[in-house]
Every structure is written in structure tokens, then in C-alpha cells.
Image (tube, rainbow, N blue to C red):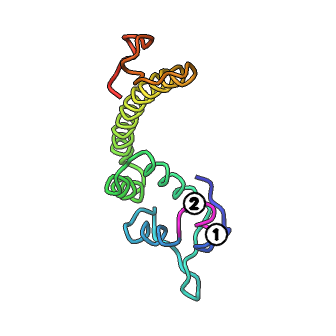
Amino acid sequence: MAHSMQELSIGQVAERTGLSVHALRLYEREALLIGPVRRSSSGRRVYSESDVEWLINCTKFRASGMPLATIRRYVELASKGAGNEAERLAILRQHQQQVAHQIAELTECLNLITRKVAVYEEHVAHGETQDPWSSPFTAVSTRQSS
């Protein structure tokens, strides 16, 4: 991660990451940031560019279904520095497999929906009035329960 000396407010980080201020505070409380959030002399949270980059990674991990506990474990390992890369790799590989499985399941769902859309489009285009799943023009390979 590139490091910059630019200091960002919690509002600026919220805008850049798409996370709410509340979510950023939650991430901090849940120890999901690598290292503590620095504070200004007035006590306000101050973030760095590397914090923003990490938070964007966290949003991708969360969007892909990675549990907070898994992110927390990864952060614990990363915070310790070198020497535990194999364990971090194992965490990422396991999640990679889970995401690949989710994608395969979603692809099956999309294929089913696409077939159903095609049948309904043909049904509507022909002005049919009966249920398309009992119509003789519906191919056996696409016939599913409605």
C-alpha cells in the first residue's frame, strides 16, 4: 500500500470509501484497521491514504461475504508484520474458494432466470393467454416450475 502524509478527516474517508461515518467507527471498534486510528491534537480521527486503501479492501472483503471475524484475524496477522504470510495466504485462499463457489451458484441461478425470461418473452410476443409452462411451444429443456 502506498503511504502518504496527507491527513484525512472521517468525513473525507467516508466519502472516498462509500462507508458511513458510523461504519468507520464500527470498523475501528471491531479492530478491522491495521493499527490504531490516529487522533489530531483536538482528538478527532485522522486517517492516512493507506487507511483508505485498507478500508476499500475491507469493503470488497465484506461485499464478497467475508465475515468480520475473518477480517479481524487477517488484520491481527498483518499488524504483527512479517513471518505469518502463510497464514494470511490460507485465509485468502479459503475465502477465494468460497467466493468462487458463490459465483458458480449465482451463475446457475442466472442461467435459470435467463431461460425463464426467454420463455416469458416468447410467450408475451406471441400474445399467449395460457400459462407458458404448460404451452406446447415451451421446450422440454427449459420447462421448469414457474
Residue extent of the magenta highlight: 12-20
Quarter occupied by residue 51: bottom right
Mark nearer the N terminus (1 vs 2): 1
Q: Which residue is situated farthest in the front direction here? A: 129
Say whether residue 21 is left or right of residue 11: left
- The residue lying at 56 percent from left, 82 percent from top is 44
Residue type at numbered disc 1: Gln
Q: Which secondary structure class fits the magenta region best?
A: helix
The quadrant of the rendering that contains the C terminus is: top left
Say whether residue 13 is left or right of residue 133: right
Residue type at numbered disc 2: Gly
Is residue 17 covered in magenta? yes
Q: Which residue is mark 2?
A: 18
Q: Nearer the viewer, residue 112 or 80?
A: 112
Disc number lying in front (1 or 2): 2
Quarter occupied by residue 7: bottom right
Quarter occupied by residue 18: bottom right
